[in-house]
Amino acid sequence: MVNTADSSQDIAHSAPVTGPVLGNDGRPLKASLARSLRRQKLRALGLIAPLLIFVLLTFIAPIADMLFRSVENNIVGDVLPRTVVALKDWDETTGELPDNATFKAMALDLKEAVEDKSHTRLGSRLNYEQSGISSLFRQTGRKVKRLDVEETTDFVAAFEDMNKKWMDVENWQTIKAFSGRFTDGYFLAAADLTKGPEGIERVPENEQIYYTLLLRTLKMSLIITFSCILLGYPIAFLLATLPLRTSNLLLILVLLPFWTSLLVRTSAWKVLLQQQGVINDTLVWLGLVADNARLELINNQTGTIIAMTHILLPFMILPLFSVMKTIPPSYVRAAKSLGANDWTAFWRVYFPQSVPGIGAGSILCFILSIGYYITPEIVGGTKGVFISNRIAYHISSSLNWGLAAALGTLLLVVVLGLYWLYDKFVGIDNVKLG
Amino acid sequence: MTATSHDDAFVVFDRVQKSYDGEILVVKDLNLQIAKGEFLTMLGPSGSGKTTCLMMLAGFETATSGDILLGGNPINNIPPHKRGIGMVFQNYALFPHMTVGENLAFPLEVRKMGKSEREAKVKRALDMVQMGEFAGRRPAQLSGGQQQRIALARALVFDAELVLMDEPLGALDKQLREHMQFEIKHIHENLGITVVYVTHDQSEALTMSDRIAVFNDGVIQQLAPPEDLYERPENSFCAQFIGENNTLMGTVESVTDGVAAITLDDGAKVRGLAVNCGGPGSRTTMSLRPERVYVGGEEGLVTTEAEVKELIYLGDHIRCRMHVHGNDEFVVKVPNAAGHKHLQVGEKTLISWETADCRALDA
Amino acid sequence: MNMKSIILSTAAGVVAASAAGAKDMTIVSWGGAYSASQDAAYHQPYMKANPDVNIINDESSAEAVAKLRAMAEAGNTTWDVVDVVASDAIRLCDEGLAMEIDADTMLADAPDGTKASEDFGDLLVSECFIPQIVYSTTFAYRTDVDAWGGKEPSNICDVFDLEAFPGKRSLEKRPINNMEWALLCDGVAKDEVYDVLGTEEGQQQALAKLDTIKDEVIWWSAGADTPQLLADGEVVMGSTYNGRLFSLIEEQKQPVKMMWDAQVFDLDGWIIPANLSEERKQAALDYIMFATDTQRLADQAKYISYGPARASSAPLVGKHAELGIDMAPHMPTDPENAKNTFLYNYEFWADYRDDIDAKFQAWLAQ
């Protein structure tokens, strides 16, 4: 009496097809279809071409270039071509200086390098690996101009005369170790590793920093993301359930932080959180905190977490809000009509459907927070700074772009790894922006 | 089966009012008794207050004043999840993150029922709607009709005595809808449950209900079994809202023995059953079903003149639009029976009806 | 027309468009009161004398080295004159990003005919550097700290004395200066500081000394931080540039005093980016010739308490333009202030900056 299969279900089961289906012009149907779609595809490509070219030129290419710098090491071979060749035959493990011919090659190379001042650039490059090489090249550069290559025979003595540090085998070892066109030195440094006499080893404990910073960055980004969920979820829920007019007004309040400059906002946190600041003053006035035991809310991890949570909160609320808005109120009503109390209806029915919003918001907050450095720099003190602060330092201050690039690449790899984990355990389909 | 007093009624609305903004009443003074086992339909256009009544019964809206009683007990202060009322929602509201089986087990789980008992009940409910094999599917993998069945099974699985349905068939195509109407009706009869059903589709209401409450403007216009409602509408709103209807406007001249003599606006005089038309001098709307009008004059009937405007051939009958005393949209269904006269467009003819079929209602 | 030529012609168009405003000169500096003093002492008089030149101020000096490198790599340097600290000038010179300056031909002689190279003397720390001011990184302290019982710090080692002078201090978030002060207060003789700091043990010794006050230090990275922290009472003493402290004390009248002991002299000055077009290079040199003469350098001291880099300018330093106070006693070079001073060791830090900074940051992060 009842047919359970609806008519729509039968359509899928058409007769099995053997061999390619031919159109009425005798060509395979697939080929004809592909041809008729080609024009559409070309037009689609034409439409996205401007953006594609723009992104390629202004985004992909610079990033690729930056990543390439993390392994690129042409400068040694370019500036010291003869020396690099001569050093090939030198056994750096004996602890003896290279031969006179190598010193001569260095003299010839340096004389040329001084012309376009590339010797000091090389010095800066090698100084990342061995302190003192920078001044060695700069000082030798001034003196090598007066060195007569034709007349000199004992180049070892001549170099010793110019600067005693040339007699230090370690400097030569460094030049040889980094004479290749490519180097893993930046990546090793970024992982707190170094090339020692017995291969790759950890740097001394008092110089390990990037591993600590990376762990701290990940841990604090998670905490920040979690605080964003905790604070943002109720607000997004409220926004999604209120009438449109009210929720739009409140949404503007949520977006308000975006309208003030990041620096102003972060500096405002300073005024609020410092020991003589508004919050501590209020707590002391209320008698909750003794005047000589004011809370340390800034220049530490607490400061970074508070300020970053504030800054990233909209990135959590907006995807949550747009996902929650698509959850019809009838689901919760249905759950209640089926006997679930408020909490069960929320937890078993509403919450699982808002998970894609949490996923999207968390990914946004987490990735943004991993890359932040201005706010941690201002309010984070020493315990609250992120690995991005070191990247920024190497980009703008130490000019060690290779190390910055290697750190950036590592960070990218870690983020991609976490993304993969997220996909594996939560599922990337479970991310919705509305 | 019809409840006539508070005492034997299962569900009672007692002087219930509802306002959202404190200015406009969306439900005005609702009094309604529903008997145990009854299938009652709330029918009306959108915004008439029928869904609000259903939501008050379910507990999702609170009555602004008045009492709602279930099984003799007031339920105004009982939260929805403690009312034990099954509900089928307009868009089914099947939980998308749970399988069909989990959806059905949900009300049993929150009632802390044991696993084996739960499984038995879920299976029975699924079998009842012929969906036994779909327990492992997700709602999104089902067709509209299948989802509808699951929603129904879920509302029934925890043995609710009262099931509310809010336009449950609205999203289905016509054929499936008609099929499901019968199915719901059968389940209702087999289980002996009480159903309160909300729809704006009058044919659905006529097919399924024991009684229909016609809502308009927050007031029940008429509460009656389907037959009475169609045959004997008590006001012009019900006459027009249910089924096809011809109207003639006029003024009451006199009322004698329940029959009103009426002067139509163009001066013609007709008679009709005085139902709800007031005394002499008051305006009235004459209501007349198209199938109760005969072509040709006949002894003992009310007979008047008409001009044929349009003819539509519909196989078993011919739909004839006529001009009758100022009404251009007067429709007569002429049976396509042997020996019937064939009308021509523009032809003038007589039409007639029984006095009892022409009801004089409020203006 | 292939892709390359399209890109090239587009780029040429952009260059041509910017060349149309050839009289614009972009001068990069630090912003704030410092840029204001340069505007009053150099830019305005120069534009008055050369009405066809329009000076555009850019406040990017903090990132000047990185930006100049990026511009040079892109082949489009848009800056004409850049104000940098001496250590940055040395690095820019090393990187080939700044042009070499011949002081005697490119800079003005002193009014008495002394050659520029002699007038600037030792302050010409790099072939590319044109010194402008001598500033110092030094300490200041609040005068209203009850816990000090009326004592006031007068010695650099009071910074490390938490018992006599409890309270938070602010120090710069880099090893330079802090390491020297730490060694000095850990018994290392002043003239041995850099020999010790060049060794692993010396670096550990300095960090160990800093460890004794680490919990009480707020680390700053912007010059404005310490004055703000002092004014808010967040710290009781802190280091920063002396000019910032001058305005905190003399202009804002905060209860703060200078402590000049072991102040570290540093230089700030101009460089001209390498590879400018001949026309722009000549314009930049013309500006430099004007802006670094004896009178102009002395003029700047009217607006900010930094010492002019020329010996011949010192006698011409007068009163503050607005406050009307004598500026000479507020100069770091004033004999009363300069009893115990350091000069930033450019050679040493160029070599050890990366290494010691890595250790310092690792120590900070612990």
Image (cartoon, coloured by chain):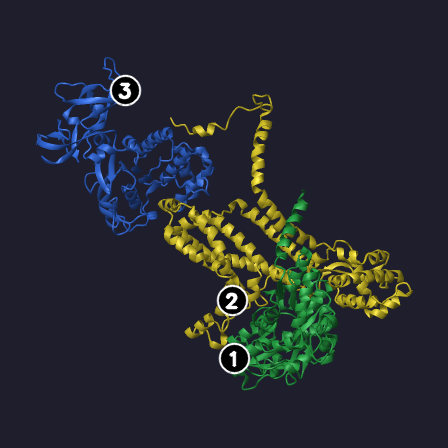
Chain colours: A yellow, B blue, C green
Amino acid of disc 2: Ser
- Quarter of the image where one finds residue C56: bottom right
Mark 3 residue crowding within 10 angstroms, few (<14) / some (14–19) / many (20+): some
Above-or-below relation of B46 to C159: above
| A285 with respect to A403 (left or right) | left
A178 or C187: nearer the viewer: A178
Q: Which residue is mark 2?
A: A267
**Quadrant including the N terminus of chain B:** top left
Q: Residue A254: x, y in percent? A: 44, 57
Looking at the image, is mark 1 or mark 3 nearer the viewer? 1
Residue labelled with disc 1: C254
- The x, y position of residue C291, in whole percent, is 65, 72
**In this rendering, the label closer to the viewer, 2 or 3:** 2
Cα distance between the residues tagged 1 and 3: 103 Å
Q: Residue furthest bottom?
A: C150
Q: Mark 3 — residue? A: B317
Amino acid identity at mark 3? His
Disc 3 secondary structure class? strand
Q: Quadrant of residue B159?
A: top left
Q: Which of the chains bears the disc numbered 2? A: A
Dot 2 alpha-carbon crowd within 10 angstroms: few under 14, some 14 to 19, many 20 or more: some
Mark 2 vs mark 1, CA separation in Å: 21 Å
Label 3 resides on the chain identified as B
